[in-house]
Amino acid sequence: MSDPLNERDQAAAALEMVARAAGPYLESLGERPVHDHGADGLLDLLNGPLPERGEGTLDSVERLLHVGTEAATHSSGPRFFHFVVGGSTPAAQAGDWVTSLLDQAGGLWLTSPFATRAETVVLRWLKDLFGLPRSYGGVLTPSATFANLTGLACARQWWGERHGADVTADGLAGLPRMPVLAGGYIHPSSRKALLTLGCGRDGARVFARDEAGRVDLEAMDRELGRIDGPAVIVGNAGEVNAGDFDPIDDLADLAERHGAWLHVDGAFGLFAAASPRLSHLVKGVERAHSVTSDGHKWLNVPYESGFAFVRDPELMGRTFGPWGAAYLPAEDDPHVNYNCLGPESSRRARALPIWATLRAYGRQGHREMVERHHDLALRLGAIVEEAPDLELLAPVRLCVVCFRYRPPGVPEEELNALNAWIGQELLADGRVYAGTTTYRGMTALRPAILNWRTTEADIDLLASVVREIAARRPG
């Protein structure tokens, strides 16, 4: 069975095997624990030496399904609250299967006009959903980290040009350090982008007015006034510990006043723009120079999916391409080539699940989902506030609820260890997933509600399991 050519007649049968497994698996997600630790032993079935001749298509796919459907973390189910993660809507999941089936090289018009046109359409639809001007350039990326890398790379090129340099061509040698300013909500993905760009993981100066990280606008304004030359401001639409927002409109005012670049990381919070009820949270985002978001969060499409939008579309081309290779399209190619607008060259057609889900549910469906999740977050917040042994640590702004267990009589200095223990036990229990964080020096739970399957029953179960685990606390 060495050469795959010998099993070409098994291709459809392998896909049929996956399709047959899909129905029962998806139907079981509402009842399964998020992680069944009793199935972890099945992971050993993935091990072993590299086969000399191969075990065959159907046997290999069958084993992968057997292990995966039992031992995987079922993060596409309704009770995965641990990180800011959605699931895959029916349309998006099917669209992703189409992506694998067609296996398009999605970076060039030459290799796939289909993938290119789909990406162009979904970027326009997403700008419409988020309230961004149609004139903005855009590109799909594998994640919010890559989206932040895209936006901040464009900021770095813009900054270099104002110093008379082309950093894309010549690098940063001989230039001063690019000033980057942020509030305390700056996310590690932005820091990772900065380190990748040679600006330093800790290159962003943080201006926070409290332990939570709320931005100190006055201090930032003063610092911008002292900087000789252009600077970059990083704002956050949706902070992961409590779901709070930087005041984007105020940051846009600072950027205009000081001639700075405003980059907005809206990994999940940008979806507030889809709801008239919540859009005030992202007021001013349409004034940013670059804006990013994540599709595998609140759009509920499969990993990997991110978006980057840049006010100056031509700057994207100056930052990322073309390279002048003889086999690649020339710079004057009349067609859009997305591998010249972002950090990837080899790109799958990740627009297809996005196209499928946006077309399937439309603006209204996504607005309803965002507002339903907000209602569920408010429900959990109300449960916490009404409970005598739970404490809400921050107002519920969007879809993250930050709280801790605080029973009467337990000294303050013991609460962090107690809540860390509850978080560990919650993950070990496996019925629901909600990890811990540190918020204003306090260890807390911070469930994020973004999965399209999640209902009131799942929220009530989360609260019940937390209380049940807390009741058996040691000592």
Image: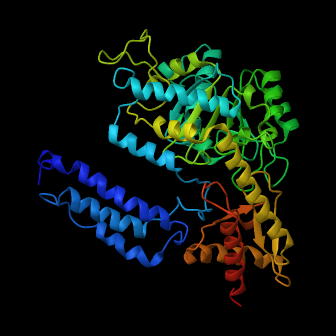
Q: For residue 275, which quarter of the picture? A: top right
The residue at the point 44 percent across, 32 percent down is: 344
Q: For residue 410, which quarter of the picture? A: bottom right
The residue at the point 72 percent across, 79 percent down is: 467
Residue situated furthest right in the rendering: 218
366 left or right of 197 in image: right
| Residue 156 visible within the image | no
Q: For residue 469, which quarter of the picture? A: bottom right
Q: Indicate the quadrant containing the N terminus: top left, top right, bottom left or bottom right.
A: bottom left
Residue situated furthest top in the rendering: 332
* Residue 242 versus residue 193 in the image, above or below: below
On the image, the x and y values in percent for residue 343 come to 47, 31
On the image, the x and y values in percent for residue 88 come to 52, 51
On the image, the x and y values in percent for residue 148 come to 59, 37
The residue at the point 58 percent across, 53 percent down is: 86
- Between residue 226 and residue 239, name the one nearer to us: 239
* Residue 256 versus residue 427 in the image, above or below: above
| Residue 6 visible within the image | yes
- Between residue 216 and residue 365, name the one nearer to us: 365
* Residue 327 versus residue 69 in the image, above or below: above
324 left or right of 14 in image: right
- Between residue 410 and residue 33, name the one nearer to us: 33
On the image, the x and y values in percent for residue 25 come to 44, 64
Q: Indicate the quadrant containing the C terminus: top left, top right, bottom left or bottom right.
A: bottom right
